[in-house]
Amino acid sequence: MIDYRLIRSEPERVKQSLQHRGYAVSMVDEWLAIDTRWRELTTRVETLTAEQNRVSKKIPQLKKAGQDVSALIAEMRTLGEQIKQLEQERREVEERREQMLLMFPNIPHETTPIGVDASQNVEVRRGGTPHPFDFEPRPHWEIAERLGLIDFERGAKISGSGFHVYIGLGARLERALINFMLDLHTREHGYQEVFPPFLVRPEVMQGTGQLPKFEEEMYRCADDPLYLIPTAEVPVTNLYREEILSIEQLPIYLVAYSPCFRREAGAAGRLTRGLLRVHQFNKVELVKFTTPETSYEEHERLLRDAETVLQRLELPYRIMLLCTGDLGFAAAKCYDLEVWSPGVQQWLEVSSCSNFEDFQARRANIRFRREPTAKPEYVHTLNASGVATARLMAALLENYQQADGSVLIPHALRPYMEGLEQITP
RNA sequence: GGAGGGGUGGCCGAGUGGUUGAAGGCGGCGGUCUUGAAAACCGCAUCCCACCUUCGCGUGGGACGGGGGUUCGAAUCCCUCCCCCUCCGCCA
């Protein structure tokens, strides 16, 4: 969440950031009104409590001196009732104040371009060379089905539409991609591997910003207060929740494989064919914890680490800097990595590389100390997909397809496929 | 899932409902002493929030797993949730 002191001290700046994101600016004044009320109630409660403490301390002394304290106790009982009532009201106001604060999106960084929607994102650079085709490239679902790599029908049969099954070399290729990415980031980029739980508690979802605003995006267990993670970002970022780290521990680089579960409510129709938008996919996620002064430098390195995956797989891609209107709720700045898919003729988003500054750290209460006696400060958290396999698989099949219906295996993956160079019908 | 035991400061560990932010011990920091170090001795100690015609080593409130309650007053009593341990059951 954002620093509520910023709403108090610079409401106009917060309003401007909300406007740039396309949010209602009225939430600033609404919150300020509630905050004022909360502060009034807090002052009253604390004044009365101070009086209560003072007298309660005196009672045993007077008693010891043999005085009659029953009148005083009766008086205190009335005071206690009064406090209890005010306290009740304060709690209600406090709850609303807190809940509303959780609905404020992060303040975009000054380098985030201002814009209303994805059309105003800024292309940063392109990489890789488009694969030339002397035939009409087919969409990945046709390639995958012809080669027996993916079974969409049976996926739908057992789990519903939006679920697919990798079969045979398809399953093998999926696992190869995951292992390739994990090896790359652990061996060459210095990330420590983590294998997290895939079900988490509500407060963990709140820590990274999925709750309370995006409740309907997630799968939830019926009989336990647990949610299926939509990304490994959630459990991994929350590893250090409620902790104070020492500065020697920073920066922390973590990489985790996890399946990702997303309801994609209301997304039916567009972009839903094949592997483009599914309810469950695999992803290798990169997460960083840094000091505030290094986070933007780390953000650029994070982007390059994710980008390396596409370079090694020799896929054509572009990097987009998201504008304020397209920026995620928790992010201050975000790059998307998009890979070109010739079969569907689309750029597919396979990674979002975000700097959340202290937005998540504040929610999850993740802090660090510069000195053993220094005041704790919030860390900065960052993450990037490195990368998501479903769309990566789609792009891979489409870019590496051959006229005869076969698919070449990228060089980087061959060691993970027992040297296999090509998948043929 | 059933039965029982337990969660106190960086760590260990006291704590009878009433000056207990919390004994004692480790560890930490500062000092005295010393050529230096050790030992000994002395001293210090957290976080969150509100308030302010003195923004201060200021005043007040809160924090003994979390949240409620009882009480003039709760680390201490009650309820609830979470976590840990032991035994039983179940199980890849």
Image (cartoon, helix red, strand yellow):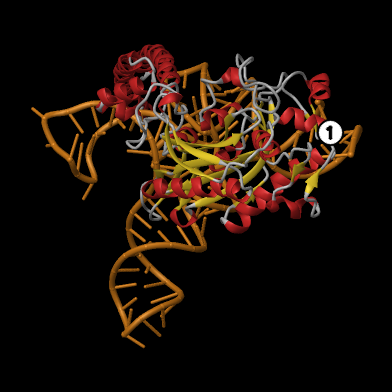
**Residue at position x 62%, y 41% from top?**
A132
Quadrant in which the N terminus of chain A appears: top left
Q: Amino acid at mark 1?
A: Gly
Number of labels in the image equals: 1
**Residue at position x 78%, y 40% from top?**
A406
Quadrant in which the C terminus of chain A appears: top right
**Residue at position x 56%, y 50% from top?**
A308
B25 left or right of B72 in image: right
Q: Secondary structure at mark 1?
A: loop
Q: Position of residue A284 (x, y in %)?
A: 63, 42
- Residue A221 picture quarter: top right
Between B83 and A357, the residue placed more toward the observer is A357
Q: Position of residue A395 (x, y in %)?
A: 65, 36
Is A391 situated above or below A214? below
Q: Position of residue B88 (x, y in %)?
A: 89, 36
Dot 1 alpha-carbon crowd within 10 angstroms: few under 14, some 14 to 19, many 20 or more: some
Is A421 situated above or below A74? below
Is A141 situated above or below A415? above
> Circle 1 marks a residue in which chain?
A
Q: Position of residue A403 (x, y in %)?
A: 75, 38
- Residue A105 picture quarter: top left
Residue placed furthest toward the front: A134
A84 left or right of A58 in image: right
Between A186 and B37, the residue placed more toward the observer is A186
A121 left or right of A391 in image: left
Between A240 and A46, the residue placed more toward the observer is A240
Q: Which residue is mark 1?
A: A148
Note whether residue A162 is visible.
yes
Between A344 and A78, the residue placed more toward the observer is A344
Note whether residue A241 is visible.
no
